[in-house]
Image: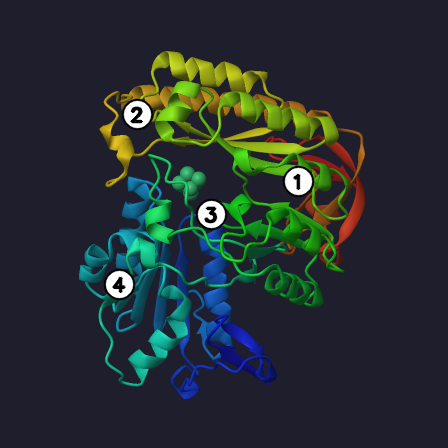
Amino acid sequence: MRVFCKKCRTFVPANNTPILYMIDTSAFQGKKAAYFTLGCKLNFSETSTFGKMLQDLGVSTAQKGEQADICLINTCSVTEVADKKCRQAIHRLVRENPGAFVVVTGCYAQLEADEVAKIEGVSLVLGSNEKANLVQFLSDAWTGAPTAKYYREKTKDIKSFAPSCSKGNRTRYFLKVQDGCDYFCTYCTIPYARGFSRNPTIASLVAQAQEAAAEGGKEIVLTGVNIGDFGKTTGEKFIDLVKALDGVEGIQRYRISSLEPDLISDELIEYCAKSRAFMPHFHIPLQSGSNTVLKLMHRHYDRELFAEKIHRIKELMPDAFIGVDVMVGCRGETPECFEETYTFLDSLDVTQLHVFPYSERPGTSALSIPYVVPEKEKKQRVKRLLELSDQKTHAFYERYIGQQAEVLFEKATRGRAMHGFTKNYIRVELPAKDANPDFDNQLISVKLGEMTRDKESLMCII
Ligand code: SF4
């Protein structure tokens, strides 16, 4: 029998925990829930875990056209646009599900709890510390226990860790290994929204990976806010987590969703280069290639260190796919600073740029930097970097045309082309005529063909 553990906020075998929630599960039976998520992979993975927890209590997911009894909106606050999208999503779900119990959580809920609680139809707002107790809050609300409209701890008191290992829409699992951040970059609100860096133990993460493997999972993406900072709570090291996960039987592929450059140690690069299952695939936030701007952002490295990390990765893993986050048009980024970023990125052997226009966030210290980039100029800079990104990605893909590669295929709608990824994250397309449902979640050796018309993938020949 599985029960809900108060300590790790998940369902566990009954004999595994002495700390159990007393939940009146009958209040959940037969209810339907609608979910809406905005933002990062971490949010999506958390929503999916909430969905699984409710499903285990008898709550099914409302299908298209069905009215939901519960609406859960997991919000993001990375930009002003994200805030607006959150409000729109809340209004829409309230409108489409009259009478539903509407819960809003996530970064926007933490930062603007008062504002969110005032939106008509919102039943409950849960901040970052409280979302881990979603089930308890719902149970209290439905059994008539008194509940407030919103619950939110101050940033310094956000201590809880909501574990999450969920299967995405397709094939991969997303394992949350860390939450929060201690860096306080001047443009970023994440530390205020998610609290300080914290993590569960290596042993508990290995157990979650083993469970994913037992369910047939072959690929796991490690998620978190500042993953390389793993260990703040437990005194363990990220490299030891990597080594322990590498030993989990059945998991064939790991990817690390993002790593701050100053936290990519030589030991980690060297380990990944010879590891069994960590893929030659890195995602590293640069944000700016100008040391002046990096200083204004309070980033923990300079461009020289960033270049050094890229060179080391490429030296040991020449086939590695390297994605780079760049923030464009932040305060203090003069035209000269932007040109420095452009030429720096142009010179680096990286594969793809994830370009984000800077968005002013209330409460951040970046607002005290006087130089503001005009919106029109910001757009032009974004466009130039996106063009550079396309050139780099296409050149990378072209290097592999004609080669043999192992692809992990993802579930596809019947009659449609199938997609999958190589070890080094090249997206491949198997035309609908060759698609086979048996390929779903299978590692298959294919020959890589020409670029597809939309230039998003390489065709594959089986
Ligand atoms: S490292 Fe900087 S940008 Fe990333 S979450 Fe932490 S404060 Fe925000």
* Ligand 1 under 8 Å from disc 3 Cβ: yes
Residue at 31% across / 48% down in the picture? 85
Q: Which residue is mark 2?
A: 331
Q: Earlier in the sequence, mark 1 or mark 4?
A: 4
Mark 2 vs mark 3, CA separation in Å: 23 Å
Residue 363 located left or right of residue 158: left
Q: Relative to the observer, which residue lies in front, 400 or 184?
A: 184
The image quadrant that residue 298 belongs to is top left
Identify which amino acid the numbered label 3 is placed on: Val
The image quadrant that residue 350 belongs to is top right
Q: Splitting the image into four quadrants, where does ligand 1 fall? A: top left
Q: Are marks 3 and 4 in contact (CB under 8 Å)?
A: no
Mark 4 vs mark 2, CA separation in Å: 39 Å
Q: Earlier in the sequence, mark 2 or mark 1?
A: 1
* Ligand 1 under 8 Å from disc 1 Cβ: no
Residue at 77% across / 48% down in the picture? 276
Q: Which residue is mark 4?
A: 95
Query: Percent from the top left, x then y, of residue 255?
Result: 63, 46
Residue at 43% across / 84% down in the picture? 29
Identify which amino acid the numbered label 1 is placed on: Leu
Query: Percent from the top left, x then y, of residue 157?
Result: 33, 59
Mark 1 vs mark 4, CA separation in Å: 49 Å
Q: Which residue is mark 1?
A: 268
**Image quarter (top left, top right, bottom left or bottom right) of the C terminus:** top right
Is residue 415 visible in this depiction of the protein?
no
Q: Nearer the viewer, mark 2 or mark 1?
A: 1
The image quadrant that residue 69 belongs to is bottom left
Q: Relative to the observer, which residue lies in front, 449 or 406?
A: 406
Q: Is residue 383 above or below residue 80?
A: above
